[in-house]
Image (spheres, rainbow, N blue to C red):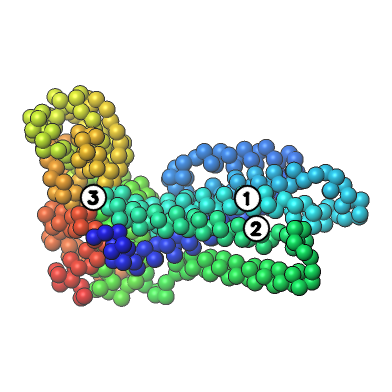
C-alpha cells in the first residue's frame, strides 16, 4: 500500500488527529498571548521585574517537556489540560522577549513628544508604544505559534490526541506511512500558522501606518477598516470554536462514563480498544478512550489519581515497578502479592490474570546468534563484550530489566544504545546493534524472524496481563468484572502475537483489529 492509498484508508483517523492538533495549538497560543503580552508590558514598565521574569522563562525553556509531564500529571491529570499548560509555558519566552524588546527600542523622542502633547502614560502606551512595537511583538507570536505546532505532538503521551499519536505510533511499528501521515499535516499546519499570524500582524497594525506607502483616501481607509473588522471577527470565531471544542472533549452526554487507558505501544493499544469495546458492547456505559498515554509511570499515576478508571498492566511490572519488590519468578506468588498490595495501598482492584505472558525477552538476528553460538543468556554473557545492546528506556532503568539482568548474568556489552519503539527493530535488522529487548508477544519478532534468547536462569518476572480497576469504579459498576475477565482464556501468547502483527506488520488500525477480534469471538455484535 503506497502513501496515498494509506491516507485514504486511514483518512478518518488522520482528520480527527489534525482537528485535535489544531484545537490544542490554537488554544495554547491564545493563552500564551493572553499571558505573555501583558507580562511583557509589565516587565518593561517595572524595570526590576525584567531580569527575574525573563530568567524564569529561560529556565522553563531548558526543562525537557517530558520531564514536565512527570511533575504535572499528579497535579493536572492527563488529557488536554497538561498539554496546553506546558505548551503555554514554552510559548511565553519569545512573546515576552519580543514584547519587551519592541517597547524598549522605540525612539525616546517620540515618547517625549507624546507626553509634551499632554498624553497620559496609558495613552502613550496604547496609542504610541504598542502600535510602534507591534511588528516586533508579532514576530514573537509567530515564532511561538510555529513552535507550538511541533510541541503539541507531546499530547500523544497523555491521551490528548493530535498528530503526535500518528507519528509515535508509526515509530513504534516502523510504519513510514503512519509517520508521514502525522508529520506532513504537522508541517503544513506550522506553515499555515505562520501565514495566519502574519496576516494578523498586518491587520492589527494601525491603518495610518499601513497607508504610509500608498495613496490615502477615504474609500481606501473605509475598505481597510471593514476588512480589519471582518478579520478580527473571524479570528474570534476560530478561537472560540477551538477553545469550546477542547472543553467539550472533557464532557459526554451520558451519566455513566468510565475512562479506559493504555500505554503507548501496539499491544497496549489493542488491549485498550478491546476492553473499551467490550464494555460498551455489553453495558450501557460510555467509555472515554485514553489510549496511548505513555509508559508505566503515566498510566499508574493516572489510575491512582482517578484520571482513568481501567487499564491493562502486567503482573511483573506491578510487582517490581509499582510495589518495589525484588524480582522473583514464582507466578502465583507474584500475582497474589500484586492483588493484595495494590488494593491495600492504592485502592486498585486486580482482576483475574489473562493467559498470555508478555515477559521481557532478548532477541538477535539468527545469523549473529549462530556466529557466536548463542542459545541462552548465559551464552550471550560470554560474548557480550563484542556486542552492542539496545534496550528500551524503560527496560534500562528497571530492577527487573537491565539493572538486575546485568548483575544476574554478568553481562558486559561493548556499548549500550538505548532505543525505543520500532527503532530497535530497524537497528538490529540493519546490523547497527546486536541484541535488543522485546516482549514475548511482539508481532515484529515474527515479522523480522528474530531469534529469542532463552532466559536459562529464569531471571525475568512473569508478566501476565491483568486488568486494573479503581475500587470505587468496580463498586459502582460490578458488571465490569465478568466482562473484563471474559478475555482471560481467549488471549494466549499466540493469539496476542497475531493481533500485534496485524498492526505492526500489516499497518492496520489497532481499534479495527481489536473490534474485529471481539466480533469473531462472539463477545460483541458487529
**Pointers 3 and 1 in contact (C-beta within 8 Å):** no
Determine which quarter of the picture holds residue 127. bottom right
**Pointers 2 and 1 in contact (C-beta within 8 Å):** yes
Q: Which mark is nearer the camera, 3 or 1?
A: 1
Q: Where 370 sits versus 71, above or below?
A: above
Mark number, residue 409? none
Q: Which mark is nearer the camera, 3 or 2?
A: 2
Q: Where in the figure is residue 310, as x and y percent of width and height?
A: 31, 60
Mark 2 secondary-structure assignment: helix
Mark 3 secondary-structure assignment: strand
Q: Where 463 sits versus 391, above or below?
A: below
Instruction: Estimate how packed mark 3 is, as few (under 14), some (14 to 19) or many (20 or more) residues with alpha carbons within 10 Å.
Output: many
Residue picked out by circle 1: 139
Determine which quarter of the picture holds residue 14. bottom left
Q: Where in the figure is residue 110, as x and y percent of width and height?
A: 84, 48
Q: Residue at x 18, y 71 (%)?
A: 519
**Left or right: 129 in relation to 319:** right
Amino acid at each position: 500500500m503506497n502513501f496515498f492509498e494509506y491516507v485514504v484508508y486511514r483518512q478518518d483517523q488522520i482528520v480527527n488527529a489534525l482537528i485535535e492538533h489544531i484545537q490544542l495549538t490554537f488554544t495554547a497560543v491564545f493563552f500564551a498571548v493572553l499571558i505573555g503580552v501583558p507580562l511583557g508590558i509589565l516587565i518593561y514598565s517595572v524595570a526590576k521585574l525584567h531580569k527575574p521574569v525573563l530568567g524564569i522563562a529561560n529556565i522553563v525553556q531548558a526543562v525537557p517537556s517530558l520531564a514536565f509531564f512527570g511533575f504535572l500529571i499528579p497535579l493536572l491529570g492527563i488529557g488536554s489540560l497538561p498539554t496546553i499548560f506546558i505548551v503555554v509555558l514554552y510559548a511565553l519566552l519569545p512573546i515576552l522577549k519580543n514584547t519587551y524588546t519592541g517597547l524598549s527600542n522605540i525612539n525616546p523622542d517620540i515618547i517625549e513628544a507624546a507626553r509634551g502633547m499632554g498624553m497620559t502614560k496609558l495613552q502613550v502606551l496604547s496609542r504610541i508604544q504598542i502600535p510602534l512595537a507591534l511588528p516586533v511583538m508579532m514576530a514573537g507570536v509567530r515564532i511561538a505559534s510555529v513552535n507550538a505546532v511541533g510541541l503539541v505532538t507531546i499530547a500523544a503521551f497523555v491521551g490528548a490526541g493530535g498528530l503526535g499519536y500518528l507519528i509515535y505510533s508509526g515509530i513504534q511499528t516502523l510504519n513510514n506511512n503512519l509517520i508521514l501521515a502525522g508529520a506532513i499535516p504537522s508541517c503544513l499546519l506550522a506553515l499555515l500558522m505562520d501565514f495566519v499570524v502574519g496576516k494578523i500582524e498586518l491587520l492589527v497594525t494601525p491603518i495610518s501606518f499601513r497607508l504610509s506607502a500608498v495613496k490615502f483616501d477615504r474609500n481606501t481607509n473605509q475598505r481597510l477598516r471593514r476588512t480589519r473588522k471582518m478579520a478580527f471577527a473571524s479570528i474570534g470565531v476560530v478561537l472560540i470554536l477551538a477553545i469550546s471544542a477542547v472543553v467539550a472533549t472533557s464532557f459526554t452526554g451520558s451519566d455513566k462514563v468510565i475512562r479506559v487507558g493504555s500505554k503507548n505501544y501496539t499491544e497496549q493499544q489493542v488491549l485498550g480498544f478491546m476492553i473499551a469495546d467490550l464494555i460498551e458492547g455489553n453495558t450501557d456505559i460510555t467509555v472515554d478512550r485514553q489510549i496511548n498515554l505513555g509508559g508505566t509511570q503515566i498510566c499508574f499515576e493516572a489510575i491512582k489519581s482517578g484520571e482513568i478508571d481501567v487499564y491493562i498492566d502486567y503482573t511483573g511490572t506491578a510487582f517490581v515497578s509499582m510495589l518495589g519488590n525484588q524480582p522473583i519468578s514464582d507466578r502465583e506468588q507474584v500475582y497474589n502479592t500484586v492483588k493484595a498490595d495494590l488494593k491495600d495501598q492504592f485502592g486498585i482492584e486486580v482482576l483475574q490474570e489473562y493467559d498470555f505472558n508478555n515477559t521481557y525477552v532478548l532477541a538477535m538476528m539468527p545469523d549473529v546468534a549462530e556466529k557466536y553460538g548463542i542459545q541462552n543468556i548465559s551464552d550471550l554473557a560470554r560474548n557480550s563484550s563484542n556486542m552492542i545492546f539496545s534496550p528500551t528506556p524503560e527496560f534500562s532503568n528497571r530492577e527487573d530489566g537491565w539493572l538486575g539482568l546485568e548483575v544476574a548474568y554478568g553481562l558486559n556489552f561493548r556499548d549500550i544504545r538505548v532505543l525505543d519503539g520500532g527503532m530497535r527493530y530497524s537497528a538490529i535488522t540493519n546490523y547497527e546493534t546486536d541484541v535488543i529487548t522485546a516482549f514475548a508477544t511482539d508481532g515484529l519478532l515474527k515479522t523480522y524472524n528474530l531469534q529469542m534468547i532463552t532466559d536459562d536462569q529464569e531471571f525475568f518476572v512473569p508478566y501476565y496481563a491483568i486488568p486494573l480497576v479503581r475500587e470505587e469504579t468496580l463498586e459502582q459498576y460490578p458488571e465490569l468484572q465478568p466482562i473484563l475477565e471474559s478475555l482471560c482464556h481467549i488471549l494466549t501468547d499466540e493469539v496476542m502475537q497475531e493481533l500485534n502483527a496485524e498492526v505492526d506488520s500489516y499497518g492496520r488500525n489497532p481499534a479495527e483489529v481489536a473490534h474485529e477480534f471481539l466480533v469473531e469471538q462472539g463477545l460483541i455484535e458487529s
